[in-house]
Each structure stands twice: as structure tokens, then as C-alpha cells.
Amino acid sequence: MKKSIFNWSGGKDSALGLYHSLNDKDVEVKYLLTTLSEKYNRVSMHGVRKELLQIQAKNIGVELKEIYLPESASLETYNNIMKKAFEGFKEEGIEYSIFGDIFLEDLKKYREDRLAEVRMKGMFPLWKRSSTDILKEFMNLGFKTVIVCVNDRYLDSSFAGRVIDEDFLNALPGNVDPCGENGEFHSFVFDGPIFKNKIHYEHGELECRAYKAKTVDADKSGRTRKEKDAVFWYRDILIKSS
């Protein structure tokens, strides 16, 4: 039995990856692991409230472990925080860390390299599958998810707050991955076969946030270039009042 933690964002790829992990007789998912902004108590980039993740975990029946990250944490700070947490998991006899990644090779290598430092291994149940096939399986299994964040470079603000369905798929521009694997959008799953109960929610405010681009070295001559500023639209999701 592979004693594991599952890296949980609350979104669709996490949910489908967890579904397959829970149905794998050789895997034991001990914890769901999520990283949150220390300042906002929300999932970084997704903007989902901590309380919503806790409700998801309760409905799944797997304990949620929360790691808090300081505002604008450097990569070094992030790596140190995560390494300390994973050393604790290793001491509990946990050998594997499961991710919902699909095809980003650099990200997969980064995860595997960090895990190797604490003598753990990565598992990727969705790896190299077609994004379209993944999303269709997700919907056919009865999962339901709402878009909580969109990158303005790819999608306009009207997509934030939409439920993923066939109409959503048909409305996606051709340059957008159906699973948003390149960061085009993020989601929050509110129903599906891993949940005991459906999560009833309502829309909160729509907020726009701009992140200043960094100036980076372009080549060995020392010339620099500036990346484009990143603009994201966030649809706040609230527990529906009775």
C-alpha cells in the first residue's frame, strides 16, 4: 500500500486525480495538502476561501493539512517551508505525493526534484492524458465545478463564475487548453462522486487584480526584457446562506 498525501487545490484536476487515487487499491490517501496565503486565508492564484476547502475535505472524508505562505514569498522561502512540511510527512511513513498535473514537464521535474530531497516520490494519475478527454470524463462522472479565476490574457471576465459544461467548452477560444493547464483559468469543485454532499454556493464579488511584470535577463549580453503585466479576474465563491 502506497501511503500518500494528495496535493489539493479544490479544482477539477485535483478532484479527478483524487477520484482515481481513492479508487486505486494500492494507494492510501492519508491527507489532502493545500497551500494558503497567510494574509488572505485563500488558495494562492485560485483565490478560494479556506472555509470552502475545509467543507470539501469534510465531504470527501480525508483530513486537510494547511500550509500558510507569507505574502510575496520567494521561491527559496516557498521551498524551505514545503521541505519542512514534507519532512514531517516522511516521519509519519508517507512515501508518495500525488499531483493533478497533466503535461507541464518542467513543473513535474521541479516537483520530483524537491521530493527527492526528502526521499519521497511523486505520483501523477492524469499525466499525459488528453485535456479534452480528462474534462469529458470529469463531467461524465458527475463532477461539477465553477470557474473562480481567469487570466485576462486568454479569457474575459464573463467566464469567471461560469460552471464548466458543454456550452463552456464550446465558448473557449482555440488557444485555451480545455483544462486550463497553462494557467488560463482555475476552478472550484462543488459536487461529484468523491463528495458525500453537494456544496451549495453563491457568487460573491468580481475582482480584478494586476500583477506587475518582472524585468528579466534576455541574453548573455546583459540586455533585459520586461514580461507583460498579468491581469486576473476573480469571482468570489461564498457558502449559500440558508
Image: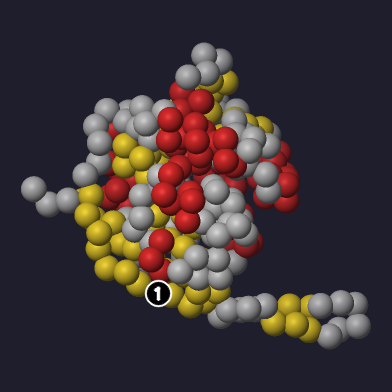
Q: Where is residue 166 in the image (x, y as percent from the top left)?
A: 43, 44
Could you tell me which quadrant the N terminus lies in? Answer: top right
How many marks can you see?
A: 1
Q: Residue furthest left?
A: 242
Q: Which residue lies furthest to the bottom in this view?
A: 223
Q: Give the left or right position of residue 117, taking residue 219 as reference.
A: left
**Relative height, residue 12 to residue 168 (above, below):** above
- Which residue sits furthest right? 221
Residue 137 visible in rendering: yes
In this figure, which colouring scheme has been used for the structure? secondary structure
Asked if residue 40 is positioned above or below residue 18 in the image, the reply reads below
Task: Name the residue type under label 1.
Answer: Cys
Q: Is residue 7 visible?
A: no
Residue on which disc 1 sits: 208
Instruction: Point out residue 17 in the picture as x, y percentages from the top left corner.
Output: 51, 33
- Element at label 1: strand
Residue, x 87% and y 77% (percent of image)? 219
Placement of 170 over or under 208, stated as above or below: above
> Which residue does the image show at 32% across and 31% down from the upper left?
195
Measured as percent of width and height from the top left, residue 137 is found at: 49, 31
Q: In front: 241, or 98? A: 241
Between 215 and 65, the one lying in front of the other is: 215
Q: Which residue is drawn at 29% across and 48% down?
A: 52
The crowding category of the residue bearing disc 1, from other C-alpha atoms within 10 Å (few below 14, some 14 to 19, many at least 20), is some
In this rendering, the answer to whether 231 lies above or below 3 is: below
